[in-house]
Image (cartoon, coloured by chain):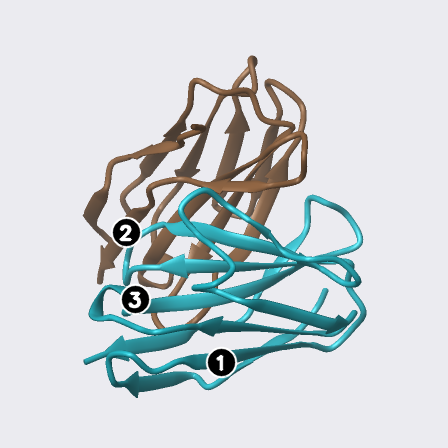
Chain colours: A brown, B cyan
């Protein structure tokens, strides 16, 4: 069974602080995605990383795919209350299935 | 991108009854997926629904409990049969975009079984 463990599980920080969320697996994925989900809505895709070692930036968010394509990280610089939500990583397998991580609930306090 | 709607958005049902959830996509898509999510937790894939073929179920999910229809490229339904309180959850449908790296989700259906 392919598992994606995220850490931390919960994170409560002050506005302006930086944070990193980790997504780890023992399995290799074709690509890895990060989603953000707000209450009452479905997850929204933030980014897809495909190549081992790849780094992508989306404004204050930086995503990195591990060299071996087994893990990933999401770094948020100067967090804002609008960043609050559930962050989910998802590994895409060779058969186009999406294996979702355990989730990180982020709360940014004003 | 694809816009996905689900009906109903929420429902409260009695034990032993069945509920059918509808998922409508605003464009034609090949692959659609059904997930289950406990509030604030991760998503678990129930099945993959391809038009013109039977749904493919993940381990722990069976067709008798979660029958799925996929009559065309823009629509799918998931039925939760013979419900018990353990079926209380959020049910999400999603559609794969032009690339296998794109996946768009509906807003979910929050089901409570009494």
Q: Where is residue A52 in the image (x, y as percent from the top left)?
A: 62, 19
Q: What is the chain identity of the residue bearing mark 1?
A: B
The residue carrying mark 2 is: A106
> Which quadrant holds residue A20?
top left
Residue beneath the point at 67% across and 39% down: A96
Residue beneath the point at 67% across and 23% down: A51
The residue carrying mark 3 is: B87
Q: What is the chain identity of the residue bearing mark 3?
A: B
- Label 1 to label 2: alpha-carbon separation: 33 Å
Residue beneath the point at 31% across and 62% down: A81
Residue pushed farthest front? B64
Q: Share a chain, discs 1 and 2?
A: no
The residue carrying mark 1 is: B20
Front: mark 3 or 2:
3
Residue B28 as seen in the image, left or right of residue B13: right
Q: Which mark is residue B111?
A: none
């Amino acid at each position: 069974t392919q598992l994606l463990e995220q850490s931390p599980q919960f994170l409560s920080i002050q506005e302006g602080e930086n944070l990193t969320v980790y997504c780890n697996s023992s399995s290799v994925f074709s690509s890895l995605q990060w989603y953000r989900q707000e209450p009452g809505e479905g997850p929204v895709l933030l980014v897809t990383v495909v190549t081992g070692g790849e780094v992508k930036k989306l404004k204050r968010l930086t995503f990195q795919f591990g060299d071996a394509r087994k893990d990933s990280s999401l770094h948020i610089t100067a967090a804002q209350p609008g960043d609050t939500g559930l962050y989910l990583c998802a590994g895409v397998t060779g058969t186009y299935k999406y294996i979702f991580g355990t989730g990180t609930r982020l709360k940014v306090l004003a | 991108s694809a816009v996905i709607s689900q009906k109903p958005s929420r429902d409260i049902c009695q034990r032993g009854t069945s509920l059918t959830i509808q998922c409508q996509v605003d464009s034609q898509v090949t692959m659609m997926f059904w997930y289950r999510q406990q509030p604030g937790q991760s998503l678990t894939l129930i099945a993959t629904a391809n038009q013109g073929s039977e749904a493919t179920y993940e381990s722990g999910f069976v067709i008798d409990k979660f029958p799925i229809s996929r009559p065309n490229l823009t629509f799918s339904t998931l039925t939760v049969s013979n419900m018990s309180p353990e079926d209380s959850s959020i049910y999400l449908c999603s559609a794969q975009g032009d690339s296998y790296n794109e996946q768009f989700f509906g807003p979910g259906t929050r089901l409570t079984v009494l």
